[in-house]
Amino acid sequence: QEGSVNKFLVDDKGVLLLVCFGLHPLLHADDPLRAMLAGQRMLDQLKEMELSGCVGVCTGRVWCGVVGTSKRREYTVLGDTVNLAARLMGKAGTKDFDQAKGLLCDRATKEAVQGSLEMKSLGEVKLKGKAFPVEVFMTTGHAIVKELDMQHSRLLKWVDWKPPQSYRKMLEDAEIFTRGGVTMIAGEHGTGKAELRWTLQELGAAQGVTVIYSSNNDDAGLMVMSTPKSVWAGILRKIVQLHKRSKGKLSGADTKQAILELAPESERWLPLLGDVLSELNVNSEHVENIKNVIGEEKADEHARA
């Protein structure tokens, strides 16, 4: 999620991490959401290792800079937001907040992520260092799926916005809809990628061509930058669903069968797709054996093919 680990402390009480989102140069419009997802992922991984943990997430301005002397100094963050996050972390590990499953956040974070994550108020709580009770929130774990309404897109209604016309011409010159092919749309958050994808789908529908698309975001629009192969996972799953004439997610056995029907020669290299399609339940030792025999670079080439 592109956060920055500022402190990593180990003492008799356990391990403490101070992670910051939004520090230069890793600044994003959805940093509060990234913080929540990172916290939840850490808790999930600790649970898999049969360990426990607790996380406090707060959003706000902090002082950041170098503190110390010429002999010893460090870059750190200070302020009420940092202190509040520490207090919430402490509360998240108590029996009073068992339902939070180890993760609490403040109102500012809740307001920043409520369009993507389903949030629930746990009421107000008295915290050390605070004159008044503070309302705390938890996530239910459910993402809010966003349906893009392109009919009311301001970008598409902007007559002077040139990318759709340029993109249309590029697709026509490349004969994408007659010969087939792949097109990639890349850009920063909020630059109109969804609008261009919608343009591609409209053009494909008009030509009677099936357009298969995927992105580094899941259906809820949550960033998954730490899993770059998710783009190919989405494309492969849609190809398999089309082949099987299914609208839902297929089992590992059905997915494997469909891939072999589409590309029988891929059976030998099928385990290499385990990193992309988790439902295949590929034995990691099998994958490592293939990589050891043909080499890491060659294995990546076969996986891409």
Image: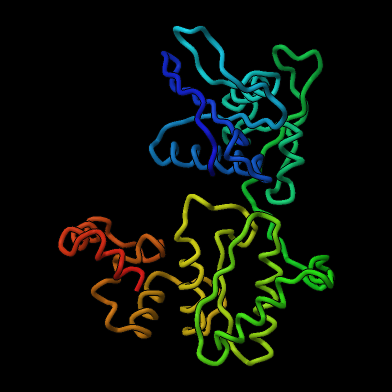
Where does residue 141 sit, x and y in percent of width and height? 62, 47
Residue 21 point in image, percent of width and height: 60, 35
Give percent across and percent down for residue 25: 58, 38
In the picture shown, does residue 178 fall above or below 5?
below
Q: Quadrant of residue 137?
A: top right
Left or right of 152, for residue 105: left
Quarter holding the N terminus is top right
* Identity of the residue drawn at 62% across and 62% down: 219
Count of marks, rendered view: 0
- The residue nearer to you, when weighing 288 against 6, is 6
Q: Nearer the viewer, residue 208 or 244?
A: 208
Q: Residue at x 38, y 85 (%)?
A: 262
Give the farthest residue toward the left.
Answer: 293
Q: Which residue is drawn at 50% across and 64% down?
A: 231
70 vs 241: above or below: above
In the picture provided, is 168 more to the left or to the right than 70?
right
In the displayed structure, 40 sits above or below 132; it is below
Colour theme = rainbow
> Which image quadrant is residue 30 in?
top right
- Quadrant where the C terminus is found in the figure: bottom left
Q: Position of residue 81 (x, y in %)?
A: 69, 24
The picture quadrant where one finds residue 255 is bottom left
